[in-house]
Structure formats: structure tokens, C-alpha cells
Amino acid sequence: MKLKRSSRLVDMTAYLLRHPQQVISLSYFSERYQSAKSSISEDLTIIKENFESQEIGRLQTQAGAAGGVCYMPYMGLAEVERLLGTLRQQMTQKDRLLPGGYLYMTDLLGKPAYINAIGRLIASVFIDEKLDAVMTMETKGIPLAYAVASQRSIPVVIVRRSSKVTEGSTVSINYISGSSKRIQTMVLPRRSLKEHARVLIVDDFMKAGGTMKGMTSMIQEFGAEVAGMAVLVETKEEQPKLVDRYVSLLKLAIPDRQETPIIENGNVYDWLPKQHVNPTNV
Ligand SMILES: O=P(O)(O)OC[C@H]1C[C@H](OP(=O)(O)OP(=O)(O)O)[C@H](O)[C@@H]1O
């Protein structure tokens, strides 16, 4: 389709936003818009400058025959602070505290606006990491895993508590879930991960870290690698956790006999890549 530059810029931007982390050749855009590569290159420079000034993401150019341009989403610091502030405000409600030191978050995990923003933030933290898959443990971590994976155009791998005849042969490991101090089982179909795959593990909540530790063991069973670990909320108690070097967006503290949870920022600011300057007020 032959478009004038302003329409080309809108269509190209929409195309890039719909194909995160995918290398798109200049030839593709040149044919799509029936325009010279030099015009396309100028267009991409305009988009890149706007993406970066508006903190929407990076537009990386890759040289060579298989080269092209790749949109890598990231969330700017101002948006990070707004998102964490909103989540803290939503979670600091008296009736969210559950027996056993849990926090009711299912309503928040079910809101696309929240879960997609949380996915974009976690993807921002790992923007410089090569990732082949996102792993989570059924059930509440699943929306979060898809939100992160969609920012990187990579698959989600869901670990279950028991094997299903509909998933073929499986690998099964036992782990101690710190929450319940009981030996539990994790199961993953053999087809899920290739050797040397780099896997980001995400979950909605971390108490003792046993579930996260179990998933790292599962990844090792497949000869794959843990590229990182991220949770939406960790508990301030149950320290030290059974894993270290994980990212947490928020931290739950439960003061004695107080019914209202205290929600603080987790360690995410320590993990944000260099283009985010750490705020002074956290
Ligand atoms: O750090 P740990 O002590 O291992 O606990 C974290 C677990 C517990 C909880 O899952 P559940 O609520 O048990 O299960 P589901 O997500 O299926 O509701 C949460 O989603 C993490 O997976």
C-alpha cells in the first residue's frame, strides 16, 4: 500500500507494537509501503526517537542479511512509580489479608490493564536478557506469565501439580513448599523445554520461596537455564527465602494484630536496567 509519510509512521508504529522482540527487515517495510529503504530508514529514526523520548521502548537496528529493526518494550521510571503506587494502594485493604500470611490478589490478577502493565514492567527488567520461555506454576501465576511472555513473543510453560493424560510423558520432581512445609510434586511435559533454553520464572506470590526453588530444579532437570526469577509480591517475613537473586515488585508486611497489610516496594528498582535512573524517593 502506498501511504504518505504520516500514515506510514502510524501504520509502522502499530506494526512494531504488535510484534515485540521480532526482527523485521527494512525490505519488509519497503515492500509493505512501496517506499525506498532510505525513506523507511528515516521513518524508523523518527519512531525510535519518539519511543525513547516517551519511554515506550527501544528500537534496535540489527545489521546483516538477517538484520532489520526490533522493538523492545520497556516501562519508563515515571510509569513504574505510577504502577507500583496504584498496586500498593489497591492491595492495602483490610479484607485482603488471608489466613497463613497470604494476600488476596485474584481480582487484580484478573484485570488486563494491571496484569499487562505488570508484564511490561517485568519484561523491562529483563530487556537485556536472552529469553526462550516464561515458566510459572499453576494457577495464579498463569496470567502474569502470559503478560510477560507476550512482551517478548516467547512461549509460556506451565508447571502442574499432577500429570495429565492430555500432556504425554512428563518429568516430575518433589519440592518443599515453604508455605505448607509439605513435600509437594511438580510435573512438566517432556515436550515443554529444550536443552539450554533460557527460562524466566515468574509467579504472583513468594512466601518461603519453595515453589520458585522447585521450578529452578525442574529447569535443571531439562538441562535448561534459569535466566531470572520475578514475583509480583514477596512476604517480608520468611527470610531468608529458599532462593536468592529474584526480583520482587512489592513486599507484604503483616504487623502483629493489625488487620491492614502494609505493602512496600520490593527490590525491583535495584534490577531495572541502566536507562532507568533509580528514584530518590523509594
Ligand atoms: O513461596 P512459597 O512458600 O512456595 O509459596 C508461593 C506459592 C503459593 C501460592 O500458590 P497457591 O495459592 O498454593 O496455588 P495456586 O497458584 O494454584 O492458587 C503462590 O501462587 C505461589 O505459587
Image (spheres, rainbow, N blue to C red):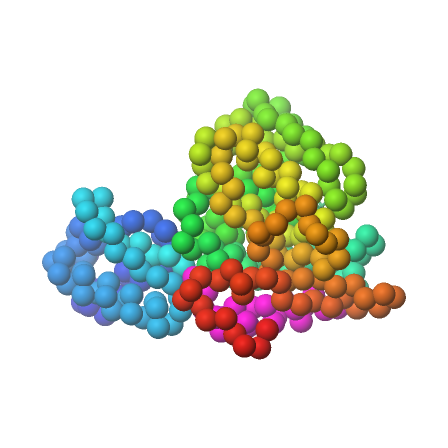
Instruction: Please indicate whether residue 281 sits to the left or right of residue 76 in the image.
Output: right
> Measuring 24% from the left and 63% from the top, which residue is drawn there?
44
- Residue 272 shown in magenta: no
Residue 138 can be seen in this image: no
Q: Residue furthest top?
A: 169
Q: In the drawing, does residue 191 fall left or right of residue 243?
A: left
Q: Is residue 121 above or below residue 133?
A: below
Query: Residue at point 87% right, 66% down?
Result: 257
> Which quarter of the figure has residue 53?
bottom left
Extreme-right residue of the structure = 257
Q: Position of residue 238 (x, y in %)?
A: 75, 53
Where is residue 274 shown, x and y percent of the image? 42, 64
Q: Position of residue 176 (x, y in %)?
A: 73, 38
Q: 66 or 2, which is in the foreground?
A: 66
Quarter of the rendering occupied by the C terminus: bottom right
Type of secondary structure dominating the magenta stretch: helix
Which residue does the image show at 60% across and 58% down from the upper left? 248
Q: Residue 108: which quarter of the image?
A: bottom right
Would residue 93 be seen by someone viewing this image from the given angle?
yes
Kindly indicate the quadrant of the structure image that contains residue 76. Answer: bottom left
Q: Nearer the viewer, residue 144 or 248?
A: 248
Query: In the rendered image of this protein, does residue 263 appear above or below residue 105?
Result: below
Point 78% across, 60% down: residue: 97
Is residue 78 inside the magenta stretch?
A: yes
Q: Magenta stretch: give its range.
A: 74-94
